[in-house]
Image (cartoon, rainbow, N blue to C red):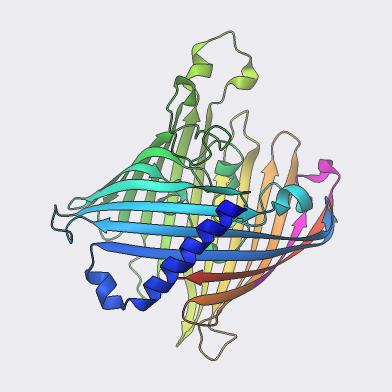
Amino acid sequence: MKKNLIFLGLVLVLAVSLQANNDSTRQSSSFLFTATYIGENAFNLSGGIKTGYTYLGFANLNLTFDTEKAGFWKQGEFFVNVANTHGKTPSESMFGDLQITSNIEAGNHTYLQELWYRHHFEKVELTVGLQDMNVEIANTENGRLFLNSSFGILPTFSLNLHAPIFPLTSLGITAKWQISDRFIWLNAIYDGTPTDFEKNPYNINWQFKNGDGILGISEMQYLSPNKQWPGTYKLGIFAHNHILERTFSNLPDSLDTNTWGLYGIIDQQIWQLNNKKINGFLQIGYSPSKISTNDFYLGVGMNFRGFLSKAHDDELGIAIAHAHLAHTNDSETAIELTWHKPLLKYFYLQPDIQYIIHPSGKSSGLKNVFAAFLRFGFEF
């Protein structure tokens, strides 16, 4: 708790200093600091493991260093992201779901989330270091509104393999090629098994052991040329294996962690009139590997921007996430309704409700969950 308070104090001090600086000063500086805090009140109104209330939070300190503005070399960029998660874990203790109702649930940790260097060539960006895969890969712009983790990263990744995603990241190399105005090709290779918090509490003790294996991902993006109805279409493939487990034939099959899969994501503007806009998204994931927990996933949602406030800055969203669980032939489905409303320049509120059908699958014996959240956030 003491470490959490110290870190949150640093976030507050930095936030005040950022607010004191005007935008033009920040843009001309070689250093760019940002700070965010998300707080969340979580309620289980019925079903799941038990009803009740808990609080959880997530704080970030980010530093970007531009080598060109600093007078060193052109097209270079360093990035550091330090994070703190605190509070309870409602999916684990109250809801019992696998898809994780809150995308900031992680327990109590203060750690290094990202540390990388990026170099911009003419049409290629090369990033090397400690990375969060989901920042660039397998994400949906319109799904960011929602709290349920499945709308951030597909369960085809999070339930099937050790991907470098929140909260625990790993070393990797990412290459982003801007083929044309319409096509982008992403390729990435990561350490296949991030060292867990028990052995690596601050995520600064990076080890690439023989048994970690490699996670490889390739994603093609198509950006629609229609300016009136913009859309982004993504198709990706991934493969993950543990080299050590495949080297020794006397190990049991249950330890053979060869996993592969496909995914597709669509972000599409559907309608716009003046300051009102409707956007939609679709996610599909498929992983037929024998050890996959989630062999098929489907997520779909719609966002309605500017409909419920005079300032037209609010966003209402409804989405459904369906994850099929291969080994039990069960499924878990989450239905979410959320509303994001900025109240001040740096502050927002977001009430949210979710209905989880068959948390962890019907065979778990858990009753359907009715969950409610009140999220708030500061962004500087």
- Residue 297 versus residue 33 in the image, above or below: above
- Residue 34 versus residue 100 in the image, above or below: below
Query: Percent position (x, y) of residue 258?
Result: 53, 26
- Residue 8 versus residue 217 in the image, above or below: below
**Res 96 visible:** no
324 and 206: which one is in front?
Answer: 206
Query: Percent position (x, y) of residue 193?
Result: 50, 32
Number of callouts: 0
Q: Quadrant of residue 362?
A: top right
128 and 289: which one is in front?
Answer: 128
- Residue, far top: 250
**Res 190 visible:** yes
In the image, 162: left or right of 358? left
Query: Percent position (x, y) of residue 81?
Result: 41, 53
Residue at screen point 35% across, 71% down: 226
State the quadrant of the C terminus: bottom left
In the image, 235: left or right of 289? left
13 and 350: which one is in front?
Answer: 13
- Residue 138 versus residue 42 in the image, above or below: above
Q: Is residue 358 magenta?
A: yes
Query: Percent position (x, y) of residue 229?
Result: 41, 73
Part of the protein shown in magenta:
351-366
Q: Quadrant of residue 147?
A: bottom right
Residue at screen point 70% across, 62% down: 335
